[in-house]
Image (cartoon, helix red, strand yellow):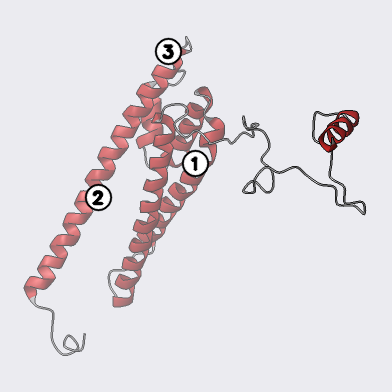
Amino acid sequence: MVYNRGALIPRFVASTSNGLVLFSVALAFAVMVATAWFLTEWMIARRAETYRDLGFEDPRARWEIRVGCLLPIVNIVGVPLLLLELAKIENRWYRQYRNIVWWSVLWGVTWLLVLVTWVARDSVTVQGVADNALFTAIDYAIAAVAAWSLRRVYDGFTAPEGHHRAVRWLAVESPQGPVPIDADQPDVPATREDNSGAAVERTGQEPAALERDRVAGAW
């Protein structure tokens, strides 16, 4: 930057920069058109298949879907409406509603920034050119987030049922029974901790049998 304060940018650098900008714009436009056409045809085929499985025909004609998806400004409302209809007839409303609404907001903001950039463009002054570049960069960033959100919407329709199955933990009884607190200690008869200090009778024997065994042992 210190060097460019007193010297112009070399011609080949400026030409290369302009060429890359034009190439990136053309590539982005081609990808946008191809993606829009592919998703429109997917929408038509998906709706037709879903209605066919239900025993009906799609109430919307093909040209109506194409106009709602491909015509600028109209597709701001048309595409979200068609997606919500598709989610409803496929019983994916609760899973897709938030994704569709979130993408619709990003889609509308992207179009709004495009219109603002187009109306407020200024290619005469240096500040105007800088403002145009800033608005364009912000628009591209939001468009990238919108594309990522659209991918989530698309995956929500194409993913098989149960693909994102939630893990549920159930509490079951252990086949070995309850585990004692002092599981690492050997199994010893329990004793009563009272003032007498006498041992507890062995399980399964009556007091009379214990007295008889004690007398027999004394003899």
Q: Residue 200 location, x and y as percent?
A: 84, 41
Within 10 Å of disc 1 (Cα), the crowding (few <14, some 14-19, many 20+) is: some
The outermost residue toward the top is 55
Kindly identify which residue carries mark 3: 52
Label 2 environment density (alpha carbons within 10 Å; few <14, some 14–19, many ≥20): few
Looking at the picture, which amino acid does disc 1 mark? Answer: Asn
Q: Nearer the viewer, mark 2 or mark 1?
A: 1
Q: Quadrant of the N terminus?
A: bottom left
Q: Vertical placement of 129 versus 149: above or below?
A: below
Report the residue that reaches farthest toward the left: 12
How far apart are the two marked residues, 2 and 1, measured between alpha carbons?
Answer: 24 Å
User: Which quadrant of the figure contains the C terminus?
Assistant: top right
Visible residue check, residue 74: no
**Residue designated by label 2:** 28
Secondary structure under badge 3?
helix
- Residue depicted at 92% across the width and 51% down the height: 196
Q: Secondary structure at mark 2?
A: helix
Q: Nearer the viewer, residue 212 or 90?
A: 212
Q: Considering only order in the chain, which callout, 3 or 1, is on the residue closer to the N terminus?
A: 3
Residue 161 spot, x, y in % from top left: 46, 26
Residue found at the far front of this picture: 219
Q: Which mark is residue 99?
A: 1
Q: Are marks 1 and 3 in contact (CB under 8 Å)?
A: no
Give the number of the mark in front: 2 or 3: 3
Q: Residue furthest right?
A: 195
- What's the residue at 87%, 34% (across, down)? 215
Q: Horizontal and vertical percent for residue 96?
A: 51, 35
User: As rendered, which of 195 and 14 lies closer to the eye?
Assistant: 195
Tell me the amino acid under the disc marked 3.
Arg
Is residue 11 at least partly visible in the picture?
Answer: yes
